Image (tube, helix red, strand yellow):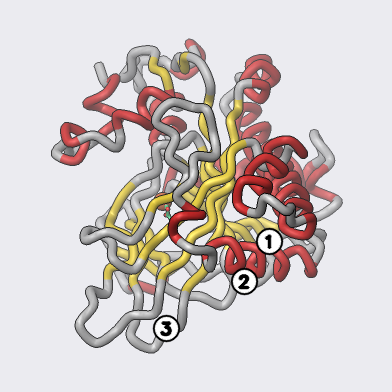
Amino acid sequence: MGSQTEHKIPVINFSEENLKPGSDSWVLASKQIRYGLEEYGCFEIVYDNFPLQLHQSIFDAAKEVLDLPKETKMQKTSDRPGALSYVAPNPAVPLYENIAIYNPSTLEGAESFTNIMWPQGNRNFRDTVHSFSKRLEELYEITTRMVFENYDVEALFDSFRNSSLHMLRLFKYRARQMNDTNVGLIDHTDSTFITILHQIEVQGLQIKTKDGKWIDVQPSASSFIVIAGDALKAWSNDRVRACEHHVIINLENKERYSIGLFTFIKGVIHVPKELVTDEYPLRYKPFDNLAFSRFYLTEEARNSPCLIKTFCGI
Ligand SMILES: O=C(O)CCC(=O)C(=O)O
Ligand SMILES: [Fe+2]
């Protein structure tokens, strides 16, 4: 009892069978998902149908773009106000950098980013980003559909789905030298509704459990880690935990690459009335997820113990 090993995030198999809405195995998978989100704020999806070659080519694409000169990566890639797509290593997180691609599953989104980075074009990069993101958005859709069904609010699902805003982020952590910190990425929750992470053969991602222990999350080559963000926590009226996580880099680690689909909701999020009960009285005012994601980067937010509560808690 009480040992580290009893903590393991749920692993859910997405197979042909349980992807049929309404089938017994669909219902079972959606219960496991709810359990994972409420207990850990995350779970792992094993998805054997995902093309193997795409696993490899998306990492090649991440390396290719993050190896470009800094001035190239610093270019503005979106008209969105405040939308800096590149985060360079900085004193707070010296090992980490990331670059974001908006609307990556649309051909225009993938293409406009690609043409800014490579004015002569890069079809391979564009197509890889496009098809990888399309697949990941399918996982996002299945997952959120299951969540809505499980909380008996499936009638709200279609309009919700249409307001999802996706961003693909490619991360690199350089190898650690003797004098470097071991902190790849500091403790945080994401400002998203949901984040889906993908990584192969790398260690370092840890999540914090309800009882305050940090546990390793080590996905397999064909799996994805689904993480609940602050917006999902608030939407669910505190049923879902926002997953606190960080990345630790060991001295023996080589460069670490990781990929994430970050999904926000456009417009105002209200807690569904079905999720307000005696046990769960209303805990959040309606809020704008994108405004929250901007607040998340401010000085005030850095000093706040629970960002989403400070932003729109009751
Ligand atoms: O690189 C990882 O494994 C996690 C990245 C992450 O949590 C983030 O950028 O929000
Ligand atoms: Fe994160």
Mark 1, secondary structure of its residue: strand
Question: Can you identify the residue that label 3 sits on?
Answer: 253
The Cα–Cα distance between marks 2 and 3, rounded to whole angstroms, is: 17 Å
**Location of residue 86 in the rendering, given as x and y in whole percent from the top left corner:** 44, 49
- Asked if residue 26 is positioned above or below residue 286 in the image, the reply reads below
Looking at numbered disc 2 in the image, what kind of residue is underneath it?
A: Ser
Q: Earlier along the polypeptide chain: callout 2 or callout 3?
A: 2
In the image, what residue occupies the spot 57% across and 26% down? 151
At x 27%, y 68%, the residue is 183
Tag 2: Cα neighbours inside 10 Å, few (<14), some, or many (≥20)?
Answer: some
**Closer to the N terminus: mark 3 or mark 1?**
1
Label 1, label 2: how far apart the Cα atoms are: 8 Å
Q: Amino acid at mark 3?
A: Asn
Q: Residue at x 33, y 80 (%)?
A: 176
Query: Do the residues under discs 1 and 2 have CB atoms within 8 angstroms?
Result: yes
The alpha-carbon separation of the residues under discs 3 and 1 comes to 25 Å
Q: Residues within 10 Å of mark 3 (few under 14, many from 20)?
A: some
Q: Nearer the viewer, mark 2 or mark 3?
A: 3
| Residue 306 point in image, percent of width and height | 23, 36
Vertical placement of residue 196 versus 162, above or below: below
* Residue found at the far front of this picture: 120
Q: Secondary structure at mark 2?
A: loop
Kind of residue indicated by mark 1:
Val
User: Is residue 128 left or right of 303 when viewed as pictured?
Assistant: right
| Quadrant of picture, ligand 1 | bottom left
Is residue 126 toward the left or the right of residue 217 in the image?
A: right
Q: Is mark 2 within 8 Å of ligand 1?
A: no
Query: Dot 2 corresponds to which residue?
Result: 220
Residue 46 is labelled as 1
* SS at circle 3: loop
Residue 126 image position (x, y, % from top left)? 74, 51
